[in-house]
Each structure stands twice: as C-alpha cells, then as structure tokens.
Image (cartoon, rainbow, N blue to C red):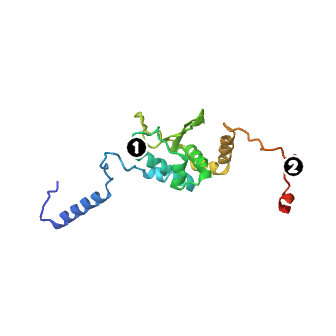
Amino acid sequence: MVEFNPRDKSRTSAGKTRAMVRKHTAPPGRSDDGSLRWQWLTIQLLESPAFTTLSANACRAFFRIIIEHTAHAALENGKLVVTHPQFVSYGVTGEYVADALDELAYKGLVKVRRGRAGSGVAHPNRFTLTFVGDHEGAPATDEWKQCTADRCRKWSETDRKLAADKRGRVGRKKKTPLRNPEIPPLRDPEIRRAS
C-alpha cells in the first residue's frame, strides 16, 4: 500500500488535476426548481446503426422528444406529448414530421402511441423513449439494439414508402373534388379579360 505524502508535489498536482477534470466533466445537477435538466446518452446508443443512420429530420425529432423528457424531470416517459408545431419550431420540416416519427419507431428509438382527432377533441401522440425507463417504473426496453445495419438500410430503401402509404390510408377520408370537372366554370377567363 502506498502512503499519501502531502509534500509530494507530483501526487498533489495530479490529484488536483483529476479533481478539476471531474468538476468540469461531471453531469449537471438539478436546477433550482428541482427538475432534471440533462439526459445520459450512452456511447453504445450513439454508435448504434439505429442512431447513426437517422435522417436529419428524425434526428431533430428524437432530440425534441428528449427535451420534452428532461422538461418533465425524466418522470413522464411514456406520457410525453410533443405537438407538430413544437417539432417544426425545433427544425423538423413540417411535411416530414410523420416520416421522422415513423423512422424513429421503426428503428426502435421511440415508441409512438398515435393519437386521434374526433368529436372536437384532439388526442395527441404520446411518446416513450426506449433507452430509459418509463413513468411506471419499468426498465428500458432498448429496442434500438435490435435494429441492424441491414434493417436500417431496408428502411431507407423500401419500408419508408410502405409506412407513408399505410399512414395515408388510415383514418383519412377520400377528398371529393369541389366541382365536376366536366362542367365548365360559370365565367370563362376570356370573358373576364374583355370586361
């Protein structure tokens, strides 16, 4: 066993250096209101095929959901609500929000419980991050670990189109044209110019 000698400058400076490194690289604590303001992302997650193959919109959507998770002190996972305007204001392209959520669900990073609208009441989508435990105390499911490089490649080639087609069919009414295309409009454009 090595004894500590306070006069040994090499040990003291190394100890101070280590303490300074720990001080400046430690995770942040809780904020003044007691809420958690940070989230661990493991190297295993960040280097996984599920994460490294994310599109730009899916990556932004993923981090927006993490922001919502940390805003609730990491206690509401499974009941997280992020609205379409929140995704758009964070940088997700408006028309690709649904595609980004489909990609996150396909790659196992997020579970999406789809909401619905009807009777004048909107029920929003609810999100669960799979790499942390949920609000009921269940452990992380880590579904993203099952997403292989081949499966990620399959998403970008074919499954994205299938998901978009499925989403387009479910719960959407077929739009009818406003007028019969065989009946000409009341006023002809040539008549407008003449008057």
Seen at 52% across and 54% down, the residue is 89
User: Which residue is found at the position 45% from the left and 48% from the top?
Assistant: 66
- Under mark 1, the amino acid is His
Crowd band around label 1 with a 10 angstrom C-alpha radius: few (<14), some (14–19), many (20+): some
Q: Which mark is residue 87?
A: none
Which residue bears the numbered disc 1? 72
Residue 142 at x, y percent in the picture: 48, 42
Observer-nearest of 85 and 105: 85
Q: Which residue position holds label 2? A: 184
Count of number-bearing discs: 2
User: Measured from the top left, where is residue 167 in percent x and y?
Assistant: 65, 41
> Which amino acid does the dot numbered 2 rest on?
Pro
In percent of the image, x 27 and y 58: which residue is there?
23
Q: Where is residue 135 shown, x and y percent of the image? A: 42, 36
What residue do we see at 86% from left, 55% from top? 188
Earlier-in-chain disc, 2 versus 1: 1
